[in-house]
Amino acid sequence: MIWVNLLLVVAGVFLMVSAVKYSLLRLFELEREKTVLFSSNYVNERHKKIDQLVRIFSVIVLILSFGAAILFFEEYILLVFAVSLLFILAELGLKAFFEWKYSENPKRSIVTLAEMSILFAASILVIIYFMQISF
C-alpha cells in the first residue's frame, strides 16, 4: 500500500510540475525546451562543466551514503533520500542561476525555480509521510 501511495504522489507531482511549467511558459511567452531523457540544456560551456561536476560528485556521494545506510544504519535510509533531494535542488539552482545570469531569456529561470519549489515541497511531504509510518 505504501508503494501505491508513493506512486500516486509521484504522478501528482509530475502533473503539478507539468501544469505549472506549461502555465509559466505561456505567461512569459517562452518556448518549450527540447530535452531527451536524462539530458540537460546548458546555457554555456561553463554551465555544462559545473553541472557535470555536480552530477559526478552527487553520484559518488549517493553511492557511498546508500551503502553506508544499508550496511550500518538501516533506519537512516531517509537520509539518502534527503541527500539526493539536496543534489537535485543544487542542480536545479545551478541551472536557474545560469539561466538568469547568462541566458537570452532570463525569465526561464523563474520556471526552473518554480519547478524546484514544487519538487522541494513534495519531497518534504514524502519525508514527513515516511517518518510518520516508520515511527
Image (cartoon, rainbow, N blue to C red):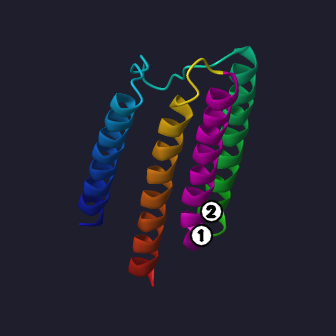
The label number, if any, that marks residue 106 in the structure image: none
| Residue for badge 1 | 76
- Residue 133 x/y as whole percent: 38, 78
Question: Residue at (32%, 33%) from the top-left corner?
Answer: 22
Does label 2 or label 1 sit earlier along the sequence? 2
53 displayed left or right of 120: right
Q: Is 74 situated above or below 103?
A: below
Q: Is 10 situated above or below 30?
A: below
Question: Residue at (51%, 22%) from the top-left corner?
Answer: 39
Type of residue at label 1?
Tyr
| Residue for badge 2 | 69
| Magenta extent | 74-102
Label 2 environment density (alpha carbons within 10 Å; few <14, some 14–19, many ≥20)? some
The image quadrant where one finds the C terminus is bottom left
- Residue 87 x/y as whole percent: 63, 46
Residue nearest the observer in this picture, 110 or 84:
110
10 displayed left or right of 68: left
